[in-house]
Image (cartoon, helix red, strand yellow):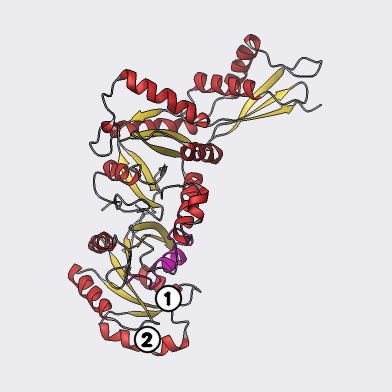
């Protein structure tokens, strides 16, 4: 199973709702796992880098193993969790002091011992006085050392982290962090996002089911491809706000995390179902991606189900798609199939190009030669009596590419002229698949 790519693997394991995700968020210092008072909230195996005492390791959160859960996908959750245990360098077995020792805890201990991996015991929720009094019974499990913690408040977590660091191998060389491209896979529920991620990874890393809403957390995993490093972020399906509002806390938070993933991403892959096409929801996601400033690639999945695919069919489909996704006129479109693997290799090639374009910087001299050529042929106009001239410009930032243009009068260009300049910049300098930011200012007086 691919890992998060930051040193040794520390896996949190335990029954549903014992506080693994709360502990995961506390130890990584960020909200990556959804926390809710619902047994079985976490489904996929989630990984994130954690740092303690200047030592880096990968912390992995698993779904609840055994115990009570009403999740219809619980069997898949257990299988994923047990697979994660096999790849651990250290297992942190989390139990619930309020519930006390239950038969499922014994079953998990048996599975942990079968892996042969070292393990420590974390008795969670010991901030409850009555629970703390009964914590002694967990020592009967025979896993040592034992730590009494309260993940919600942070009590005892530092001591647990100290023990984790003691298990890490000693490294003399400084750790080097490879440059990586963050890729958020976004779209409506059930368009094949997780299937596409599994196809790219060439293994069943992310849980797949026909039931909409299978993915809840944003699952990220590192993929090495042609000496490139991608961090793939598989997100929950983004439904219409009205439908999410009635879907409960877990799905509402899932959508928030999906939006946050786009803000983290260098490139967003918007997955569209070829059999259904794009609609208002895809249009809204497109707008959010453009606002986030990430590059975008449109992946039309399930293309193998389109009858009689050919140049004419593809052209007609793409024309309609462009009309529906007006925000993304600059995004390349790929027709592929996560099921058969058709053209999925092209997706990584395209993502790599778009990520490079998003980071591209153009020298000021080239920007001004471009402006002189373009504005001579197509000068800007204003509602005032004076002619508007672009005196000079410069690129002020990357990711996304940002430019400032200085004019002789205080004015803002019409939307159509902004669009013209943006398209010319993209065509001239190769800003494929990335939004471009333009700021217009009057030249300051000397």
Which percent across, then down, holds residue 398? 54, 34
Q: Are marks 2 and 1 in contact (CB under 8 Å)?
A: no
From the viewer's perspective, is 46 left or right of 152?
left
Q: Residues within 10 Å of mark 2 (few under 14, many from 20)?
A: many
Q: Is residue 273 magenta?
A: no
Residue 53 at least partly seen:
no
Between tags 2 and 1, which lies in front? 2
Is the residue 91 above or below the residue 184 in the image? below
Is the residue 309 above or below the residue 49 in the image? above
Of the pair 136 and 206, the residue shown nearer to us = 206
Which percent across, then down, holds residue 339? 24, 39
Of the pair 133 and 187, the residue shown nearer to us = 187
User: Could you say which quadrant of the image residue 411 lies in?
Assistant: top right
Is the residue 124 above or below the residue 11 in the image? below
Residue identified by numbered label 2: 135
How many numbered markers are drawn?
2
Lower position in the chain sequence, tag 2 or tag 1: 2
**Magenta residues (range):** 15-35
Which percent across, then down, holds residue 315? 37, 20
Which percent across, then down, holds residue 170? 33, 63
Secondary structure of the residue carrying tag 2 is helix
Q: Determine the residue positioned at 32% across, 88% down.
A: 137
Q: Determine the residue positioned at 43% across, 31% down.
A: 354
Is the residue 145 above or below the residue 397 in the image? below
From the viewer's perspective, is 362 left or right of 118?
right
Check residue 159 in the rendering and tell me which mark sits there, or answer none: 1
From the viewer's perspective, is 393 left or right of 32?
right
């Amino acid at each position: 199973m691919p890992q998060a790519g930051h040193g040794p693997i520390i896996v949190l394991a335990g029954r549903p709702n014992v506080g693994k995700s709360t502990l995961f968020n506390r130890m990584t210092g960020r909200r990556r796992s959804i926390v809710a008072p619902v047994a079985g909230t976490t489904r996929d195996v989630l990984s994130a880098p954690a740092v303690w005492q200047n030592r880096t390791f990968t912390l992995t959160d698993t779904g609840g193993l055994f115990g009570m859960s009403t999740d219809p996908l619980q069997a898949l959750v257990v299988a994923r969790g047990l697979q994660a245990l096999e790849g651990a360098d250290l297992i942190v077995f989390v139990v619930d002091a309020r519930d006390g020792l239950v038969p499922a805890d014994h079953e998990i201990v048996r599975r942990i011992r079968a892996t042969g991996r070292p393990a420590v015991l974390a008795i969670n929720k010991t901030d409850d006085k009555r629970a703390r009094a009964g914590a002694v019974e967990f020592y009967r499990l025979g896993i040592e050392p034992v730590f009494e913690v309260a993940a919600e408040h942070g009590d005892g977590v530092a001591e647990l982290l100290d023990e984790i660091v003691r298990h890490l191998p000693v490294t003399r060389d400084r750790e080097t962090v490879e440059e990586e491209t963050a890729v958020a896979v976004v779209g409506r529920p059930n368009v094949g996002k997780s299937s596409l991620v599994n196809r790219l990874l060439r293994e069943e890393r992310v849980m797949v089911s026909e039931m909409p809403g299978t993915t809840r957390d944003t699952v990220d995993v590192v993929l090495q491809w042609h000496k490139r490093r991608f961090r793939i972020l598989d997100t929950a399906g983004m439904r219409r706000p009205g439908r999410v509002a009635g879907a409960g806390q877990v799905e509402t938070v899932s959508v928030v995390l999906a939006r946050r993933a786009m803000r983290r991403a260098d490139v967003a892959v918007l997955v569209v179902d070829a059999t259904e096409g794009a609609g208002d929801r895809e249009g809204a996601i497109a707008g959010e991606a453009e606002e986030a400033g990430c590059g975008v690639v449109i992946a039309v999945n399930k293309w193998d189900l389109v009858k009689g695919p050919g140049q004419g069919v593809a052209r007609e489909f793409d024309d309609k798609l462009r009309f529906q996704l007006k925000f993304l006129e600059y995004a390349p479109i790929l027709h592929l199939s996560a099921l058969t693997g058709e053209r999925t290799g092209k997706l990584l090639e395209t993502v790599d190009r778009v990520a490079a374009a998003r980071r591209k910087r153009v020298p000021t001299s080239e920007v001004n030669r471009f402006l002189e050529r373009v504005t001579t042929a197509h000068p800007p106009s204003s509602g005032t009596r004076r002619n508007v001239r672009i005196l000079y410009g410069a690129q002020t930032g990357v990711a996304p590419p940002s430019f400032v243009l200085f004019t002789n009068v205080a004015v803002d260009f019409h939307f159509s002229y902004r669009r013209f300049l943006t398209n010319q910049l993209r065509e001239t300098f190769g800003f494929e698949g990335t939004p471009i930011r333009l700021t217009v200012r009057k030249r300051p007086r000397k």
